[in-house]
Image: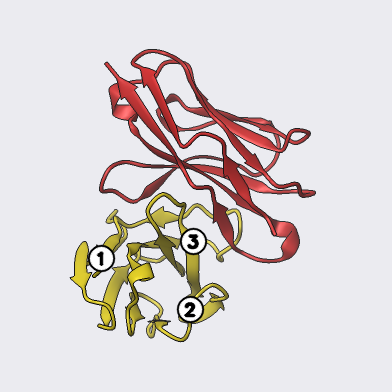
Amino acid sequence: AQSVTQLDSQVPVFEEAPVELRCNYSSSVSVYLFWYVQYPNQGLQLLLKYLSGSTLVKGINGFEAEFNKSQTSFHLRKPSVHISDTAEYFCAVSDPGTGGFKTIFGAGTRLFVKA
Amino acid sequence: EAGVAQSPRYKIIEKRQSVAFWCNPISGHATLYWYQQILGQGPKLLIQFQNNGVVDDSQLPKDRFSAERLKGVDSTLKIQPAKLEDSAVYLCASSSGGGLSTDTQYFGPGTRLTVL
């Protein structure tokens, strides 16, 4: 069964610094990959997704992620963070090869941006 | 466009009591999902509906949890009787596609359940 590992449970960073949130998934021939953000007291919101094509995916709010098949990773990056980026970030994977529809979420990484 | 609506936002009950959560998806979205998010974990799919039919309920504890989407629009998730380990945020999501792996899911704000 597919699984997702988010390597950092918390990431503190100063405002305007770059950040990388790491995500690894278990191997498969083909996968779809997603990053969602959850602001306090709100539901999850899609940041970006990789379905096929270019391995560098750009999303909303200046975030981007790179799909690396050989390392089974999909790390999220932002070159300069803002206080408003403080939130929980979830990496998720869907495996169309199994014929199922289920999206598997990682445990989340809490990004805390300090002034 | 209105988002996914959920109610109540918070619920506190004692173990062995019953509770129900309501979700109204984005208008026109055929697929509806219920997730359980335990503190410190990612969301876990409980059940997925395509219109009023169940696509996947493999992780729904059917001895105590039930869900319905009778008219293919809004949905209710029920727990009867509740256990301490059911304390979690229950998220509802919807999507406009056929419930495929590629669909973008739109989430509601969730219902935080505390079982004492």
Report the front residue among A50 and A1.
Answer: A1
Between the C-alphas of marks 2 and 1, the distance is 18 Å
Query: Label 1 near label 2: C-beta < 8 Å?
Result: no
Amino acid type indicated by mark 1:
Thr
Of residues B10 and A31, the one nearer the viewer is B10
Q: Colour of chain B?
A: yellow
The picture places residue A62, in percent across and down from the top left corner, at: 44, 24
**Separation (CA) of disc 1 from disc 3:** 17 Å
Q: Which residue is outermost to the top? A: A16
Please check whether the numbered discs 3 and 2 fall on a single chain: yes
Q: Earlier in the sequence, mark 1 or mark 3?
A: 3
Image location of residue A51, percent across then percent down = 65, 44
Mark 2 or mark 1, which has the lower sequence index? Answer: 2
For chain A, the rendered hue is red
The chain holding disc 3 is: B
Compared with B111, B48 (above or below) is below
Rendered image quadrant of residue B23: bottom left
Q: Are marks 2 and 1 on the same chain?
A: yes
The residue drawn where x is 27% and y is 63% is B111
Name the chain under label 2.
B
- For badge 2, the amino acid type reads Pro
The kind of secondary structure element at disc 3 is: strand
Q: Dot 3, crowdedness within 10 Å: few (<14), some or many (≥20)? A: many
Crowding near pointer 1: few (<14 within 10 Å), some, many (20+)?
some
Q: Is residue A38 above or below residue B76?
A: above
The amino acid type of the residue labelled 3 equals Lys
Residue B42 at x, y percent in the picture? 47, 52
Residue B33 appears in which quarter of the rendering?
bottom left
Query: To which residue does mark 2 refer?
Result: B61
In the image, which disc is placed on residue B44?
3
